[in-house]
Image (cartoon, helix red, strand yellow):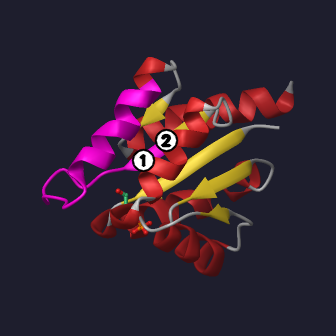
Amino acid sequence: MVNVALIAHDKKKLDLALFAKEWKDVFKNCKLYATKTTGKILKEKVGLEIQTFESGPLGGDLQIGALAVGGKIDFVIFLRDPLTAQPHEPDVSAVLRICDVHNIPLATNLATAEAIVLEIQKKLNN
Ligand SMILES: O=C(CO)COP(=O)(O)O
């Protein structure tokens, strides 16, 4: 099983939903985790099954970070909004840092997300 965390800031949620729709055949074969609002949108708009945590500003990023620390996450796609300050910026940074600490592939934009999804596809086909 490939475990994937999907997170997007508000201005990036539509991008992530369209991306997930495009790659639904891949994502539907993964175990998916998301923060609350991101997961709700992916469930409703894309029809993916997804385990959700708290909203990012309420600690959801840290919950996903903790899963990553525990070896439960293989890939992270985290579409950050680089143009809007976030009240929970330290939590956002913590997720990025923990991906680096544990060498977890992390995409923070759609170009890298596409590279990751191709890698997931390869893994699923093996
Ligand atoms: O804020 C977030 C990531 O930092 C995402 O949280 P939501 O998915 O609940 O909007």
Disc 1 and disc 2: Cα gap in Å? 12 Å
Element type at mark 1: strand
Would you name the residue on which mark 1 appears? 78
| Location of residue 2 (image quadrant) | top right
Q: Residue 67 at x, y = what percent? A: 60, 41
- Classify mark 1 as within 8 Å of ligand 1 or not, answering yes or no: yes
Residue sticking out furthest to the right? 126
| Location of residue 43 (image quadrant) | bottom right
Q: Is 88 part of what is drawn in magenta?
A: yes
Comes first in the chain, label 1 or label 2: 2
Numbered label attached to residue 65: 2
Give the camera-side residue of 53 and 21.
Answer: 53
Q: Is 116 part of what is drawn in magenta?
A: no
| Location of residue 73 (image quadrant) | top right
User: Which residue is rendered at x = 57% and y = 76% of the image?
Assistant: 40
Residue flagged by tag 1: what amino acid is it? Phe
Residue flagged by tag 2: what amino acid is it? Gly
Left or right: 25 in relation to 76: right
User: Which residue is rendered at x = 68% and y = 62% of the image?
Assistant: 51
Magenta-tinted stretch: 77-99
Left or right: 118 in relation to 19: right
Q: Quadrant of ligand 1?
A: bottom left
Numbered label attached to residue 60: none
Rendered position, 71 above or below 66: above
User: Which residue is rendered at x = 28% and y = 68% of the image?
Assistant: 11
Q: Residue 61 at x, y = what percent? A: 43, 52
